[in-house]
Image (cartoon, rainbow, N blue to C red):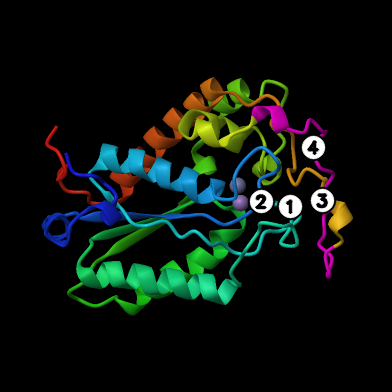
Amino acid sequence: MHSVFIEELDAQTYAEHLARPGATIIIPAGATEQHGPHMPLGVDAMLSRTIAGAVAEKTGALVAPALCYGYKSQPRSGGGNHRAGTVSLGGCSLSQMVEDVVGSFIAQGFDNVVVLNGHFENYQFIYEGLDNAVARTRNPGAAARAMLLSYWDFVDEETLSKVFPDGFLGWDIEHGGILETSLMLLLHPALVKMDRVVDHPPAKLTPYDIFPEDPSRTPDSGCLSSAKGATAERGRLLFETVTSQVADALKNELLLGGMPLEAN
Ligand code: ZN
Ligand code: MN
């Protein structure tokens, strides 16, 4: 069986996939961003890439190399861009990168391009790049479709109530919290140090931003909520819900063709 990750494919295998009707590529998007003392800087890209790989196996898609820099981390969703370890792009750079990469995949002949986002702050800038790439290539001969999603938006109420039995306070404060830590415990356990989790109440967020940022507004841990309740079992619930729901959305919205990588 071929890898679904194109960086592991030779050009001929890639071209064979591309030539099939309904050829689909998923681009994972993440960030380089501190995730507290217990997790690595690459969490957002690692999770979106692994989720994209599982979705690709369910849909016959391929996965592009992840976008490993994201839009500026913000205090109300990622701890803030001032934190050590957080290295970001400006909005124009991110939008332009997405436009260029998506435009290249469409020009190569992919029928469908999906960006699977794993960093909260990225969304609107990816939207801009995708919209421009599709508009630019819109012509009678090319009918490429694109989709944009953030994986946490596919967690349903039932899963939420199991993963957050004490109540769910919103995705924005899940930076370095139970969602990401549980998924990392399932998918990349060697990179998580649960003995270093700082147990503190959820960050108190103001309904506004200030400039320049006041670092004292971010909890010292760099996380916006505690990962204390994170477990690999919770990660399993999240992963299975997200991958099956995202795969269903792709099947509903895109003409995927067959299952080119492996008949099933
Ligand atoms: Zn994250
Ligand atoms: Mn992030």
Q: Is mark 3 within 8 Å of ligand 2?
A: no
Tell me the CA gap for discs 1 and 3: 6 Å
Please, is residue 25 above or below residue 240 in the view?
A: below
Residue 204 in sight from this viewpoint: yes
Residue 134 in sight from this viewpoint: no
**Residue 195 shown in magenta:** yes
Q: Does label 3 or label 4 sit earlier along the sequence?
A: 4
Q: Are marks 4 and 1 in contact (CB under 8 Å)?
A: no
| Residue at image coords 74%, 52% | 79
| Residue that carries the numbered disc 1 in the rendered image | 79
Q: What is the three-letter code of the residue carrying label 3?
A: Thr
Which region is colored magenta? 194-213
**What label does residue 109 carry, if any?**
none
Please, is residue 146 above or below residue 211 in the view?
A: above
Q: What is the three-letter code of the residue carrying label 2?
A: Gln
Tell me the CA gap for discs 3 and 4: 11 Å
Q: Can you give x and y, in whole percent of width and height, for residue 85 in the image?
A: 66, 56
Q: Quadrant of residue 201?
A: top right
Q: Can you give x and y, in whole percent of width and height, for residue 165 in the image?
A: 67, 20
Q: Can you give x and y, in whole percent of width and height, for residue 38 in the image?
A: 66, 37
| Residue that carries the numbered disc 2 in the rendered image | 34
**Residue 39 shown in magenta:** no
Q: What is the three-letter code of the residue carrying label 4?
A: Pro
Q: What is the three-letter code of the residue carrying label 1?
A: Gly
Tell me the CA gap for discs 2 and 1: 8 Å
Q: Does label 1 or label 3 sit earlier along the sequence?
A: 1
Q: Nearer the viewer, mark 2 or mark 3?
A: 2
Q: Is mark 2 within 8 Å of ligand 1?
A: no
| Residue that carries the numbered disc 3 in the rendered image | 218
Quarter containing the C terminus:
top left
| Residue at image coords 26%, 42% | 59
